[in-house]
Amino acid sequence: MKVNKLTATIMVAVGLFASCVENDNPVNPIDPDPAASDKYVLITMSERSLEKPGYASAFNELPSGDVVNNASGSLQGLGFGGWRPQNNRLFKMFNTSAAELGIEELKVDAEGTVAPAAFIKTDQNTNGSGNFVIASETQGFYFDGANPLDIQTFDPTTMSRTGEIKLEDAVNERGVDNPEILFRSVGQKFLVVKEGKLYANISYAKTDGSQKGFWDDYFPEVYLAVIDLESLEYERTIKIEDTGSIAYINDNNMYDFDDNGDLYIVTQGISAVGGKSKIVRIKAGEDDIDSSWSLNMDDITEGGKFVSVFAKEGKIITVVPNTVLTGGPSGNINDADVWDFYQFDIESKEKTKIEGVPSVTNPGAAFCAIEIDGKVLLRVTTKDGSTNGYYELEGTTAKPLFNVTAGGSVSGLYKVSQE
Amino acid sequence: MVRKPAFLSFYLLLLCTSLATAQQGTWVTVHIENNSTGEPVGSATVQLGETTRSTASDGSATFESIPAGLHTIKVSAVGFVEYTDSLTKYARENLLLSIPLSARAEQIESVTVTGSSANQKIKQAPIRSVFIDTRAVSNQAVSLTELMNRSTGIRVRQNGGIGSRPEISVNGFQGKAIKYFKDGIPIDYLGDGYNLSALPVEMFDHMEIYKGVLPVSLGADALGGALNFVSANKNINAFQGYYEIGSFSTHRLGVRASRVSKDQRWGYGGELYVNYAKNDYQALVSVTDPQTRNTYPERVNLFNNAYKHLLAEAYLSIKNRTWTDELKFTLTGFGLLKEQQHPALMTTPYGALHSKQHTIAPSVRYKLNLLDEKLRIDHFSSFNVLKSQRIDTLKGSYDWFGNFTPRATVGESRLPSDSRVDERQWVNRTNISYLLSPSSKLEFNHVATHAKRKGEDPLGPTLQGTDIDVLSLASSYNKQVFGLSWEQALFGDKLENQLMGKYYVFSSSGYQNTWFSTDVTENDKRSVSGNYWGITEALKYNLSPSTFIRGSVEYAYRLPERDELFGNSVFVVPNFELTPEKSWNVNLGLSTKSAPKLTAEVNAFYRNTEGLILLVPIQAPNAQYQNQENVRGYGLDLDLVYRLTPNYTVNANATWQDLRLFGISSAIDAWKNDARLRNTPYFFANAGASGKYGNVFAQNDKLNIFANYNFTREFYLETIDKDLEPGGFLGLSGSADLNSSLVIPNQHLLSAGATYNFSGEHLTLGAECKNLLNKDIYDYYRVPRPGRSFHLKLSYKL
């Protein structure tokens, strides 16, 4: 009897103590709520290594406050430097099990479990393999370095390759006998679908080694092949003047559509640390580069480049380096807080620095800005990691939405509606 | 050589005269044991008349065809007083003699003799090492890596079958933190020729694996430990040959012979080993459908995975002169060809990519004992050019079924290559010890290595904007490790003490921005250097003749290696800003043989290592070695051997280690503090049983059967939060609480076999089935290792 009293006393004391303790634990994902029809899936990169390991977790609500992304039940895998979600589906250019190049879909179920699904494998020796775009539920296009002069077609529903578009003739319209051009490809760095046409960059590279496609462009112009989506016939080639290299070859596709259908395209310029980098556009209803408009990094700051673009309602959100970019082991281009958020008015090109947000590191394969539930969110990660999450943009001021405290640097957030 | 008078009375135990039969008795078996502990003395040299034998690890040696009559028997072993006596053998009589040896009074000296043959003193030294008796299992179709994996605290992981480069993990430390020696000499200069997975067990008498703390004679900047291969005894007339055939077209052949002149003033011999393995075992891979490009799992036979290896050594030694105890000239050479089936991850099959390496390395070793053996001088010097090639010139690609698709571009891999790299290397090692008193010794050790690398690759990278081959830029690397130790035996030899200091110096030069500069100039040339001090204290206390405790504390450095500084001229780019790793290592252990049938040893360790050098990506696609993580933790090893009967023995060992990251200040990675060191098993265990039988099929034959089981607990290829680790006692229950393909699951490996020694002892047949249960076993990123395999080995010893 005495023992029972003692036990009861201890239990009551523990209960009282527990009720008094403030619950300051960060938000953890995977709180099973099958009733929730939407899942907010967050990915982070946990290690800066070649395989880009990381985590993915699903939340029932748009996260806020402090967030843990490697909690119980989270998906751990490779190739989490970024992703390329489209049409309510999650895709990335590296598979989760081995960081192989290709197109992998991640699926999230009603319980919030994120898992890798189908995978289309590509050549592993050519960067950019797996660069893709989806035109419809049954039509998608991707680049495979095994056949660099073709664009592969696939069915996004079955996630299977269906064929290819032969573009050798289009590629060989120029430089065909030039001995300095060692590698040619189409769609390696840029694929976009706009108003019934597929646009694919044509690379003329001065190297054919491990880095083919990296800052080795022969021509100062960037060439884009235009293909009719219905007939899959090549139509013509358009070009972006005087820049060097378009986009990059990772999940961040470096283009975006404004609400009015105008397409904004990043060109990275003549070297890894910039020079002649610009944002150009193809206006809605047009199928050629708008020669009357470009946003030139050289006009904004010396020795810089664009690395991401987000367009909405006549404004462009992007990051601009606040110092001269440098590469190498102690370079600032990737790991230093040298990138500031700016909003550009497309018409006037007037720039406005976004307030309330610190200078950040290079978003790399992640998008610098995204839109979810009508909110514009900025990816904000600083070198010391004190800030690592998304800020919500209101006007030209941003405020913290959530901060990831465990799991690595944020590399993507997307809302998937359960069907 | 000083001949000591026999001071022991002749101790002959006639155990089995009843074995004498109607047949004329012809053999004498001697069993040598330590007089004070009763433990067998392996590698003792026993001379009976004109015949010389070396004892096995159980202390026994057998002489056949010994005629009746009076014979002189002489027994010598390192660390023991030489024994000489005579015996009379009668006809129709087989003899089994038990001869106890007394340890030398100069106990310290015997403890620390390096490059010596096996003896129990090595196991009992204050600095702990794991002793692997290779000679005792040389009749088994077993590899060095398998032997090591059966030992406490040691994991050898391989990326495939024979010839794949193994990585040793000692108490959780791996890679370049572990150094390799042969007879006390660093063997970096022999490149992949001394690949653990290919070296035959016959080549060595035993292996010593030091965990954490190294004796001063092993002059290296190791943090995690060191592996010292100790060559088979060459001071006797011996011949040995073997041939092994196994699954996956495995063939291993070796011959070894040594000869000593009657007057003991000349010695010569040689050895030749050939290894070939097609390694075409089945592996579960992800196969790509040629039309849909979807992947699906399929078991296929590997097809570009062969390994050819030839290793030869010849020597001539001048011995027992006034000016030298031994002056030995050795010529070592090897050549190998290694086909490469896939990159580090099993993502892409290669059908022709391969690499080659060869060298011829002359060396000289000089040993001299002076002042009545109080002063010992041991010097080694070698110069060689290590030549390496990597060939990836195929125009096309293969699929996992071996189907070829031609392509216009060169190279199956991301790195087409036709490279030739020469590394000119000069290695010097000097060891001098002086016996201050019978219980006190001073020892000095110096190792100097110099390497210069230069090469060419017409398909390789060039400096951006130029035609300059990156490999053509010469790089140099110099390293020196000085060591000084003072050893003492106190309180009637109950307490042994070793105090050591080490001084490390290195310098290197090369070009830093070969991957980035548009025009490399002299401004891009970097010269770096550094010098550092380390200290070690080791103690051993004998609680009783059969029980002792020992402990050691060390503060040591691991200097950046040449490939970490230079890069590999492909993806791994130079970094001349690397600093050494540094570590505190503490070891504490207890060993006892208090029960006659039971030997038990328990050891604990603590490590605190800062600035681990890891490969990290910089500007894509390049990677670079950088000082990254700090690791600390502790671990426990337990090793038990129980002799059920004289014929049956069981053994078991287990290692648990808790090595965790610390000192991560970045908020983004702060969650990793206290997480386990990734890609490192934290629990593994072994169990084995063996039985031996005599007169099974014929008189005087011997049959040994054995089985070994290995268990490796799941571990994590990438860092996981501590909260997600499995629970239970020591984290041994369940699985990590996350959905991951980066968890290597629990693994079970069972192997069993037998050896049969035909009457007369010369010929032995060994058979073994490895991975008996045909389980999927992995080491690295789920790269599978061979499934069930069968091996047959025929050995001949004279």
Image: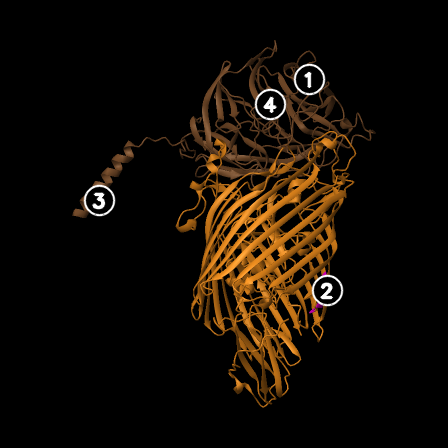
Left of B407 or right of it: where is B441? left
| Residue marked by disc 4 | A308
Q: Is residue B242 magenta?
A: no
Q: Earlier in the sequence, mark 3 or mark 4?
A: 3
- Mark 2 = which residue? B315
Q: Residue furthest right?
A: A177
Asked if residue A374 shows in the view, the reply is: no
Query: Do the numbered discs 1 and 3 sit on residues whose CB atoms are within 8 Å?
Result: no
**Circle 3 — which element?**
helix
Amino acid marked by disc 2 = Tyr
Closer to viewer: mark 1 or mark 4: 4
Q: Which one is in front in this view, the residue at disc 2 or the one at disc 3?
A: 2
Residue underneath mark 3: A7
Q: Do dots 3 and 4 share one subunit?
A: yes
Taking depth in this image into account, of B137 and B14 the one nearest to the observer is B14
The hue used for chain A is brown
Could you classify mark 2 by the number of other residues whose Cα lies within 10 Å: few (under 14), some (14-19), or many (20 or more)? some
Front residue of A412/B137: it is B137
User: What distance separates the C-alpha of mark 2 from that of mark 3?
Assistant: 80 Å
Query: In which quadrant of the rendered view does residue A237 lie?
Result: top right
Say which of marks 1 and 2 sits in front: 2
Q: Vertically, is B465 above or below A304? A: below
